């Protein structure tokens, strides 16, 4: 990743009043044009079409659905995440460009909800990725979804919605939980540590024993074997 | 960002390539995936890849009390949850030999038919969106919301109503509710010509849907296809008429069929079913004021309820097809085994895999939405 220029991202500019005004303006604009990627992981997704279309109409808040993770700002996790889905959710999250925000809709993302004793679902989403906001309820009404989005907009505007930095600063913790679930040689095609260096967000928890494990296991990534009849080679096997 | 040592693997030269379609894709219904092998843009082989929504329902139900499972079952099929509750409640009633009061049966029919209308409107919305007609989607979702409002007033929940318990239903109708049902039905009926002009007669849709995803009647029967998809091949089979449950034998309705078995016929059958559901609901609205009596049979303390040992198989007609429960009790406080036979597992796995072959890549979404498969119910 040496090709990326090491530009430090300056987040604190206390001294210069003009820069403060500029930052404020950027945050204002950022909070007024959000693209969501709704990953329909569970039943909560059924309340999103009413929230998006004519009746509740989230477009009036400047929020629109987007189909690809690269262009999206918000990742909406709408309900329980089964373990098979969770791998895809993490892949999706890591592909999104920063700053990025995660909203967990439904009680199932908070603590497992109805499926607290199910063998197939991951119970707490925030063990695997930082979550900005939870909208609890089984399932939350469209009004609650909109209220949650407005709350997120306010937090972006005031500069409090910084949980994406947390993923870089505490990558070891998140990776550890992921490895616990998917096996020790779990690895995604995204290089988070280099990215953290790029954003100048290396914290105390970025590197640790789990990331060491990652280095041990890291082998040249092969293109996934996707011949028909063969399952995707999961790193757990 | 890829690690520096990333190297793409080379494949032997071939005219075919493979594409992962889903799980997070606008052309796929919900969290479901297909692996397709393409030659140009023609599908050579398709393989369903489910399990993204697996929660282990059948195991979870063995670990909960009979009454607790009522809150769990609607989650099996999210767009059309009511038949799930009713089917489970009927199964428990049959095991216990409970007699359900007449009024509760009529109320259940009302719930089922309202749910069918909501599910069909939602399907039209999704189907129209795959052909790029977003106005129909906006309309469909907005009109479905009117029914959800009725549900909210009637049962307390917008989507998951949890209105049934074994032995009857949970609550009486609110005042003036039947009047509001009639008004909503009138409104939806008045909208149907608009839908016809916007969507069902629209050449964009007709040209793409006609001849897409064709199956013959023999194939449909061999593959276990039920519901509107079977009726679109010309066979008038409907559990509501051929094996009546609740009070469907006292109601007057038709079974619409179409002959061609393609995406267009399947959508048209659903469109005609809307009219029949409205007709059934009108009869229910007219009949309900004269049917007095309790709304549920007395049941023992639900927290210490040992259902007599035995096994039972019940079926109802959901908006997607035939929904069946096989419930075994060993006389304990929890079910010994529950098996759900949902319609979508046939539609989304075997049928979709076979029907996609030979079609173009852009028609997969069309085929999937016209089959109206429901991924949470496939994976359970
Ligand atoms: S909280 Fe309820 S509605 Fe949401 S995903 Fe869980 S079970 Fe479904």
Image (cartoon, coloured by chain):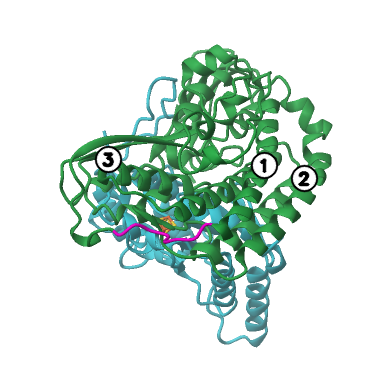
Whether residues under marks 2 and 1 lie with C-beta atoms below 8 angstroms apart, the answer is yes
To which residue does mark 3 refer?
A: A217
- Is B62 positioned to the left or the right of A124 in the image? left
The answer to whether A106 appears left or right of A208 in the picture is right
| Residue B287 on image: x %, y % | 59, 53
Based on the picture, tell me whether residue B294 belongs to the magenta stretch: yes
Chain B: colour as depicted: green
Q: Colour of chain A?
A: cyan
Span of residues in magenta: B291-298
Q: Residue at x 23, y 59 (%)?
A: B300
Q: Judge the density around disc 1: few (<14), some (14-19), many (≥20) Cα neighbours within 10 Å.
A: many
Q: What is the CA distance from the residue labelled 2 to the residue labelled 3?
A: 60 Å
To which chain does the residue with label 1 belong? B
Q: Is mark 3 within 8 Å of ligand 1?
A: no
- Distance in Å between CA atoms under marks 3 and 1: 57 Å
Q: Chain of mark 2?
A: B
Task: Give the percent coordinates (x, y) of residue B293.
Answer: 45, 61
Residue occupied by mark 2: B192
- C-alpha separation, residue under disc 2 versus residue under disc 1: 9 Å
In the rendered image, which residue does mark 1 sit on? B274
Residue A93: percent from the left, percent from the top? Answer: 47, 53
């Amino acid at each position: 990743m040496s090709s990326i220029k090491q530009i430090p991202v300056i987040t604190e500019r206390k001294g210069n009043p003009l820069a403060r005004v500029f930052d404020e303006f950027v945050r204002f604009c950022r909070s007024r044009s959000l693209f969501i990627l709704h990953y329909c992981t569970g039943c909560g997704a059924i309340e999103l079409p009413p929230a998006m279309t004519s009746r509740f109409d989230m477009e009036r808040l400047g929020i629109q659905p987007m189909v690809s993770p690269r262009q999206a700002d918000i990742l909406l996790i709408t309900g329980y995440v089964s373990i098979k889905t969770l791998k895809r959710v993490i892949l999706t999250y890591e592909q999104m460009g920063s700053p990025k925000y995660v909203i967990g809709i439904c009680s199932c993302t908070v603590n497992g909800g109805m499926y607290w004793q199910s063998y197939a679902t991951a119970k707490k989403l925030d063990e695997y990725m930082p979550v900005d906001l939870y909208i609890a309820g089984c399932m939350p009404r469209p009004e609650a979804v909109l209220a949650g989005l407005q709350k997120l907009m306010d937090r972006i505007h005031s500069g409090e919605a910084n949980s994406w930095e947390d993923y870089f600063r505490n990558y070891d913790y998140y990776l550890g939980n992921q490895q616990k679930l998917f096996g020790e040689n779990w690895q995604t095609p995204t290089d988070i540590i280099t990215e953290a260096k790029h954003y100048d967000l290396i914290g105390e928890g970025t590197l640790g024993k789990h990331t060491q494990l990652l280095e041990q296991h890291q082998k040249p990534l092969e293109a996934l074997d996707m011949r028909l009849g063969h399952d995707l080679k999961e790193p757990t096997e | 960002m890829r690690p520096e040592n990333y190297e793409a693997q080379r494949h032997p030269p071939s005219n075919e390539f493979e594409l992962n379609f889903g799980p997070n894709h606008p052309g796929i219904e919900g969290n479901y995936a297909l692996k397709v092998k393409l030659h140009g843009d023609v599908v050579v082989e398709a393989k369903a890849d489910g399990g993204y929504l697996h929660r282990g329902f059948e195991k979870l139900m063995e670990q909960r009390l009979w009454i607790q499972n009522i809150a769990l079952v609607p989650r099996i099929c999210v767009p059309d949850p009511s038949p799930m509750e009713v089917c489970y409640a009927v199964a428990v009633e049959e095991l216990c030999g409970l007699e359900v009061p007449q009024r509760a049966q009529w109320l259940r029919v009302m719930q089922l038919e309202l749910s069918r209308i909501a599910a069909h409107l939602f399907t039209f919305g999704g189907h129209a969106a795959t052909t790029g007609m977003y106005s129909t989607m906006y309309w469909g979702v907005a009109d479905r919301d009117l029914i959800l409002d009725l549900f909210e007033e009637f049962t307390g929940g917008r989507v998951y109503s949890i209105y049934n318990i074994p032995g009857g239903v949970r609550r009486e109708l609110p005042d003036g509710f039947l009047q509001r049902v009639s008004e909503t039905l009138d409104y939806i009926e008045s909208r149907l010509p608009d839908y016809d002009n916007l969507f069902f007669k629209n050449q964009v849709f007709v040209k793409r849907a006609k001849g897409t995803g064709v199956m013959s009647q023999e194939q449909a029967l061999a593959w276990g296809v039920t519901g509107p998809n079977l009726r679109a091949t010309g066979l008038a089979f409907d559990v509501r008429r051929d094996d009546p449950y609740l009070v469907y034998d006292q109601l007057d309705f038709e079974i619409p069929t179409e002959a061609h078995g393609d995406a267009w016929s399947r959508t048209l059958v659903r469109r005609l079913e809307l009219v029949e559901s409205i007709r059934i609901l009108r009869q229910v609205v007219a009949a309900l004021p004269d049917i007095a009596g309790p709304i549920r049979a007395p049941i023992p303390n639900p927290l210490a309820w040992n259902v007599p040992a035995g096994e039972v198989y019940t079926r109802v007609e959901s908006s997607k097809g035939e929904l069946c429960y096989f419930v075994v009790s060993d006389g304990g406080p929890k079910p010994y085994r529950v098996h759900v036979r949902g319609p979508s597992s046939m539609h989304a796995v075997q049928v979709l895999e076979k029907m996609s072959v030979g079609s173009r890549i852009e028609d997969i979404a069309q085929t999937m939405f016209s089959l109206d498969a429901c991924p949470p119910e496939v994976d359970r």
